[in-house]
Image: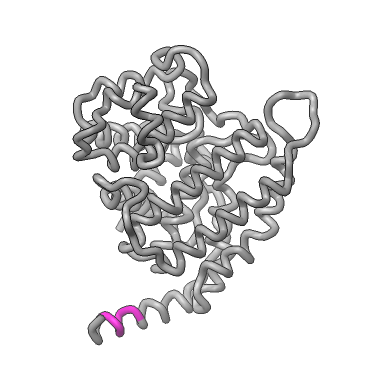
């Protein structure tokens, strides 16, 4: 690092040290408000972040060699602790099959400890950002009242990571491990919660939706498979391919999970994914999924009404 870069980093650090962080809250109250979101700095930052992560893992497997920074390791440690809490809080005996109320105990433990967890992630000059950052983590694993989980909660975790990048705790060189390590561990935890506490899908579109719970791993996973000469889109419906390669590619791990939790012909229970298998190239699959994510998640009021805005991801108009 040359002197100019060092001075720039110091100036930015000093500015952030004086920044007034706030606890985020929802601001999209009506469908009309959606235009504020679509033209906001937050929307631009969020979409740009997803695109950057998507590009970073192009052609890279989950086992690709990458440097794990101190912050990335701290995030992995947090996710490991949250996973351990699931083991410590077993499902309750109850009459109803879905929505085990023990999840409420787990989520309350997260909310009670999230700020202190963020203190282990953020450097000294950003400890006053813990409340704002922790709020996104609190929203990342499901709704305590309905005991459900969906793409809005997944988006909250992406927003959590985006905020850490915006305040320069995470750097561009962290993008690959953010997907292959951090986001992958988040998915493992989300699925553990779904199965342990029998969580309902939030806003599921049934057989016409991409997936009951997730979306982003299909985007990142299809990017991983770009330039892969062994696995083409038509192959992901083949059980042998999924079994052999699911540890290496997020997309195939998603297919494996779907096959575990759903029964019957794949074409019937996952109609949209079945259609994607007829696309010839992963590049086209990837670009199509990005467009679909914007249309089916980021432009949908039922999802964005729960998105939270603070001083990092702001609803102010794009400059």
Query: Which residue is painted at 57% across and 54% down in the image?
Result: 80
Left or right side of 68 for 113? right
> Image quadrant of residue 169?
bottom left
Write down the region rendered in magenta: 5-9
Outermost residue, bottom direction? 3
Q: In this view, does 254 lie above or below 271?
A: below
Left or right side of 252 for 119? right
Q: Is residue 250 above or below residue 49?
A: above
In the rendering, at what x and y percent does residue 23 appear?
A: 57, 60
Left or right side of 226 for 22? right
> Image quadrant of residue 131?
bottom right
Query: Which residue is painted at 41% across and 45% down in the image?
Result: 37
Is the stretch drawn in magenta largely helix, strand or loop? helix
Query: Which residue is painted at 23% across and 83% down in the image?
Result: 2
Please check the rendered image and state whether residue 6 is part of the magenta-colored stretch, yes or no. Answer: yes
Residue situated in front as seen by the camera: 223 or 50: 223
């Amino acid at each position: 690092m040359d002197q100019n870069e060092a001075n720039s980093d110091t100036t930015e650090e000093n500015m952030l040290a004086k920044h007034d962080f706030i606890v985020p809250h929802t601001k999209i109250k009506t469908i009309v408000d959606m235009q504020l979101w679509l033209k906001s700095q937050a929307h631009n930052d969020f979409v740009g972040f997803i695109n950057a992560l998507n590009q970073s893992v192009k052609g890279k497997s989950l086992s690709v060699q990458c440097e794990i920074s101190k912050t990335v390791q701290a995030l992995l440690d947090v996710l490991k602790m949250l996973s351990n809490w699931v083991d410590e809080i077993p499902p309750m005996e109850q009459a109803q099959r879905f929505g085990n109320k023990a999840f409420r105990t787990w989520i309350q433990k997260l909310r009670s400890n999230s700020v202190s967890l963020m203190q282990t992630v953020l450097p000294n000059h950003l400890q006053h950002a813990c409340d704002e950052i922790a709020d996104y983590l609190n929203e990342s694993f499901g709704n305590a009242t309905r005991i459900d989980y969906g793409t809005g909660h997944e988006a909250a975790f992406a927003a959590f990571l985006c905020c850490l990048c915006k305040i320069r705790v995470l750097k561009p060189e962290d993008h690959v491990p953010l997907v292959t390590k951090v986001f992958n561990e988040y998915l493992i935890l989300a699925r553990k919660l779904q199965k342990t506490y029998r969580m309902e899908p939030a806003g599921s579109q049934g057989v016409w939706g991409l997936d009951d719970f997730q979306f982003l791993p299909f985007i990142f996973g299809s990017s991983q498979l770009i330039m892969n000469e062994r696995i083409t889109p038509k192959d992901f419906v083949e059980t042998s391919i999924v079994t052999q390669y699911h540890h290496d590619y997020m997309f195939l791990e998603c297919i494996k999970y779907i096959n575990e939790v759903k029964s019957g012909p794949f074409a019937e229970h996952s109609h949209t994914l079945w259609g994607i298998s007829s696309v010839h190239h992963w590049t086209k699959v990837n670009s199509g999924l990005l467009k679909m994510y914007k249309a089916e998640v980021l432009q949908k009021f039922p999802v964005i009404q729960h998105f939270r805005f603070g001083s990092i991801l702001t609803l102010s108009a794009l400059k």
